[in-house]
Image (cartoon, helix red, strand yellow):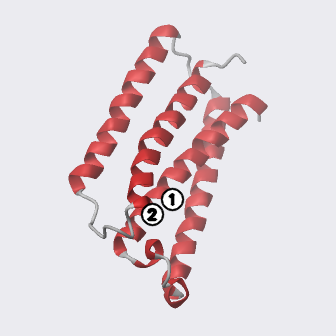
């Protein structure tokens, strides 16, 4: 398949997001019931810096290989639609957490849903999944068209 400059950038962003945050969240959820330690502020900052550095390096290589193209109305429309999907996904997840807080007696056996640190990691997971939804929707509409 031949990908455009925008699609290559989206695939790179999706890969970096899934790799870095997937690695972090896998470790966080696997140790959650064993270690109820709060996530370190520095740990989260380092995670964000890693994502920014890797994104910059990959986008720089892509920019060297391909001449940057100007954005047109189609690009803006695709971004708008994909952000809407990400927003709706995140809204549904937040509503899920709000209902879970109201019905916390039913979720006593799941430490991820009852501890503050579990909630923190669940919120982070939902934010990352909303971003992934945004990337996937953009890729879909660049392939399919509007």
Query: Which residue position holds label 2?
Result: 123
Q: In the structure shown, which secondary structural element does the residue marked by tag 2 occupy?
A: helix
**What residue is shown at x 37% (from left), y 62% (from top)?**
31
Badge 1 is on which residue?
126
Position of residue 126 measured from the top left corner of the image (x, y, whole percent):
51, 59
Q: Residue 99: percent from the left, percent from the top?
A: 55, 81
Q: Residue at x 50, y 82 (%)?
A: 109
| Circle 1/circle 2 CB separation < 8 Å | yes
Q: Is residue 15 above or below residue 108?
A: above
Residue 34 drawn at (x, y percent): 35, 68
Name the residue at 58% across, 40% down.
135
Marking on residue 21: none
Outermost left residue = 42
Q: Residue 145 lies in what quarter of the image?
A: top right
The answer to whether 129 appears left or right of 73 in the picture is left
Tell which of 12 and 138 is nearer to you: 12
Give x and y (percent) for residue 13. 50, 33
Residue at the far front in the pictured view = 34
Residue lying at 62% horizontally and 59% vertically, measured from the top left: 88
Distance CA(mark 1)–CA(mark 2): 5 Å
Q: Is residue 14 above or below residue 36?
A: above
Label 1 sits on a secondary structure element that is helix
Vertical arrangement, residue 79 with respect to residue 8, above or below:
below
> In the rendered view of the protein, which quadrant contains the C terminus?
top right
Res. 94 in view:
yes
| Viewer-closest of 139 and 23 | 23
Dot 2 alpha-carbon crowd within 10 angstroms: few under 14, some 14 to 19, many 20 or more: some
Residue extending furthest toward the bottom: 105
Indicate left or right for 19 with 70 as reference: left
């Amino acid at each position: 398949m031949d990908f455009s400059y925008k699609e290559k950038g989206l695939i790179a962003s999706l890969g970096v997001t899934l790799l870095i945050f997937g690695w972090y969240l896998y470790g966080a959820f696997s140790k959650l019931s064993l270690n109820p330690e709060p996530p370190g502020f520095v740990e989260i900052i380092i995670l964000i810096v890693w994502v920014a550095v890797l994104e910059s390096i990959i986008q720089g290589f892509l920019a060297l290989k391909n001449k940057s193209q100007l954005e047109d109305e189609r690009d803006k429309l695709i971004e708008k639609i994909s952000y809407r999907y990400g927003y709706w996904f995140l809204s549904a997840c937040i509503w899920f957490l709000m209902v879970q807080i109201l019905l916390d007696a039913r979720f006593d056996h799941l430490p991820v849903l009852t501890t503050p640190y579990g909630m923190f990691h669940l919120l982070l997971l939902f934010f990352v999944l909303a971003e992934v939804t945004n990337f996937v929707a953009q890729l879909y509409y660049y392939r399919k068209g509007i």
